[in-house]
Amino acid sequence: MNTIADITDTVQKTPADRPNDEGHLGLWLSLPAQLLVLFIAVFPILMQIYISLTDWSPLDGIGWWRAWELWNSFANYTDLAQDNRFWSALLRTLLVMVVCVPVEFLLGLGLAVLFVDEFPGRRFLYSVLLIPMMVVPAVAGYMFFMLFQSGGPINDILAFFVGQPVKIAWLSDPDLALIAVMVADIWQWTPLMFLILLAGLVGVPEDQQRAATLLGASWWRRFITIVLPRMKTIMIIALAIRVIENFKIFDTLFIMTGGGPGVATETISVYIYKVTQQELIWGYVAAIALAILITLSIVSAYAIRHVSSPEADT
Amino acid sequence: MQRSAGYEALRFGLILLFVALTLIPTLWMVSMAFKPIAEWSATGSDLTWWPKNPTWDNFAFIFGQSSSELIVSLDRTAGRPILASLLSASFGTVIAMVAGTTAAYGLSRFGSGANLPLALIQLRLFPPMAVMIPVMIMWAFLGLTDTWWGLALIYGIVTLPFAFWLMKTFFDDMPREIEDAALVEGCSRFRVFVKITLPMMRPALASSALFVFILNWSDYLIALLLTTRDWVTIPVYMASLSSSMTGQLYGAKAALGLIAAVPPVIMGIAIQKHLVRGLTFGALKE
Amino acid sequence: MTEIRLSNLGKDFASFTALADMNMTIADGEFMALLGPSGCGKSTTMNMIAGMLEPTTGSIEFDGRDVRGVPMARRGVGFVFQNYAIFTHMTVWDNLAYGLKARGTPRAEVARRVEETASLLQLSPLLKRRASGLSVNILQRLAIGRSAIVEPAIFLLDEPLSNVDAAFRAVMRTELKQLQRQFKQTMIYVTHDQLEAMTMADRIAVMDHGKLLQVGTPLDVYNNPQNTFVAGFLGSPGMNLMQGHVRQDGSSTAVDFGAHGSITVSDTAIEAAAAKSDGRVQFGFRPEAAAPSQDGALRFPVNFIERIGSRTIVHLGDPDNAIKIIVANQTELPRVGEVLSLDITKGSERFFEIESGQAVGRQSDGLH
């Protein structure tokens, strides 16, 4: 029987036998990416799970596949629960995040507000303000390493305000080193907040703001009741990006302090790095890494479900 | 909108303050790169904001020329690390762009690989440090440790999410009528992709590639773990300059830092209008 | 509740003059339409009244008080935007309450007045709803209610119907007119749609190229256009215009259109106007003021016939004198190519000077 569906089917197929051809081509096109993801996700994770249940170390002289000889069940995980250095590194990482991300957000938002209206030189200064986020983080770390030397320019500037020589040893003082590290992070990543939030601010409909003004709203009221709610999604994106990236903090910090003095600036990434490179107990590192991966997966799944609200406003 | 002169003055004052805070650290490194050794660690009243006797010595030094003032000599010059950075970042970009572009096109036009968007975001979510143990083992097993191609491979994977998401939003934005017209003419899908879509996408491809290159070029941690000697990259080499020498080689490191910092800054400014799109995984387009 | 007086109002953007030398008084409680094609200066005028733009020259007075320099938040102007600019992230209630809250009105009072306005506009059942996804006529009512609730002295409406599809416009026009009667406020309505202006406004101000051309009641502006632009812009199709020579025909004066015939006139002003440009004058008549007749004064060949449902438009003449007439549907239609002779309804002939395009003789009620 010749139904209409049959006819339209044949008509659509004419240009190069579409459905089949396209299905295969699509699979082929996504194959390289799929393979890379498999290569970096599935096999390494399985290997990581395996090694994390052993005491294996590259120094043992046996291949990783024979790690079962050093099977220790869940000892790595029970050790981790009692590893004070790990927990304080985790807390320190969260502390850095809780300080840096809001400061970067507020500075970036303030700067975006200053830039939302046209002024002469706006485009040029905009580019200048984006420079920090493009500087290689390790180089940025080195910049701040120099700046925070006890004979460096930061003390020099402080001396100018105080009126007498300042010799603060920023990077070798356990309390100050963390502050120095956070200053560097804020310097480098405020521009990212600025960039994203300015794009959001420019997108707030002008008519709405005018309507609010005509109804007698002050600048501040307009900002709170119209501009910020309209930027909600964008603010969440900006914050999420920085929370994720800040959690990984390593390059700048490691160049500046190497995690020291002592463990004063040791974050999660630095801690794992040290255990990997210096103590070489890879079975334990794998356990730490897995614990973090699992925690992050749960947190992110929760965040994606609860933060991305269904009511998307245009 | 009319605003008071006081507000405008305040606004300009604040903007200039931000610009100054942005520039001072950068300029300090630039200044340091041109300072002779005598001015490197001058402090207090001797501290010089701008080199009194600017010199190219620091640059000459890192490329192997020992100067009269710098008695130490380097066992390795900066040439090879620069080459390592260039090779690994470039080929890493090629890998990410090829896999990312094809997969993005497949998803955008045929809906294939629907798992990729989320999988790749998760890949970006995890700290590299938390997956490096198996990678180090695998790389050693495959003989990829301390090679530029081994670095290129991991760079390609790490920046794949950005290449994929950027290209996906560019493909989604592209009108399909042109492709459809070519299909009706009888071109095969693949031919249309290669002969029509990709050439049209050249600006988007260039911006995405530059973006990915900046990310690869900026890496420190991965190179720190996967290279040891022959193919260390600029940041690793730079960090090693101080640990192997007696005292800090401020000027030399600043010169090297400047060399490392200039390309991404120029590229970043060149692709400014796509930065928001890239950094937010295409969620925001400017 | 306010009279608005614009004196010598002008606005330049760099070297471009958006508005020049505008003089107009809008009476208290009047519904005034600013009508003209895009770029005529109507929106510029309104934005200056609202305070979004500062005039380059001239002044704006509300009840005799110069408002130049008064920020828009304190002019007491209600503004309905083209897209309504409803705060879609808020509820209907919050939208209505916005202006009152911004003014620091006590809570109880806010609640009372929101209820009041909502019931007046039949928005009461929707108060808890989010304002996104409401239909366009509800958005219009909400936009008006949101402005009206703070009791502005003046209401400005910026093409509020331009985003509405044609079928719905008639409904919205009626509703808008009713709302104006309810609120009894001075309203200025900017539009490029003559139908909106004609049906709703008390008076219409026709503008073009930054100039005010004519102000008057809809009928007056329609019947007595003061220049050829207004004549051609109003009406659909607009007034027919053709050039003729004034000559003495024995004791009477006639305007001669060569092969197309001639008409006799009795107004000496026409001769005076013609004297300014070699005896030529522009003659105008409305398409509905001409009817085919056995031996009419004017004769034109029929070019084509356009049926638009209730009426039929007959296109006549040659490229220099393209004439359209409207005939009822039942009329026996002429054939294409046939020469049709037309009678012009007595009293509906209009004349304009060739150079200036200004109307001759019969004047409208004037600019004020």
Image (tube, coloured by chain):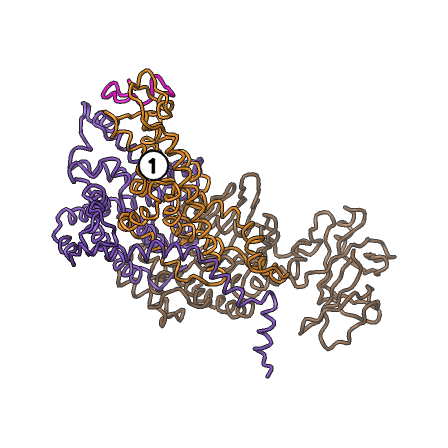
Chain colours: A purple, B orange, C brown
Q: Residue furthest right?
A: C250
Please name the predominant secondary structure of the magenta segment in the image. loop
Q: In the current view of this chain or complex, which residue is farthest to the bottom?
A: A1
Which of the 4 image quarters holds residue A185? top left
Quarter containing the N terminus of chain A: bottom right
Q: Please give left or right for residue C112 compared with residue C232 in the image.
A: left
What span is in magenta? B38-56
- Is residue C66 among what the camera can see? no
Query: Which quadrant holds the C terminus of chain A?
Result: bottom left
- Name the spot of residue A233 as percent of width and height, x first: 35, 56
Q: Which residue is mark 1?
A: B232
Position of residue C28 measured from the top left corner of the image (x, y, whole percent) = 47, 57
Instruction: Give left or right: position of B73 versus A26.
Output: left
Q: Is residue C300 inside the magenta stretch?
A: no
Between B101 and A220, the one lying in front of the other is B101
Report the amino acid beneath label 1: Val
Image coordinates of residue C71 in percent, x first then y, are: 40, 46
Left or right position of A5 against C328: left
Q: Is residue B162 above or below residue C29?
A: above
- In the image, residue B54 lies in the stretch drawn in magenta: yes
| Residue located 25% across and 39% down the image | A253
Q: Nearer the viewer, residue B8 or C269?
A: B8
Q: Is residue C142 above or below residue A85?
A: below
In terms of secondary structure, where does tag 1 sit?
Answer: loop
Read off the chain for label 1: B
The one nearer the camera, A66 or B256, is A66
Q: Residues within 10 Å of mark 1 (few under 14, many from 20)?
A: many
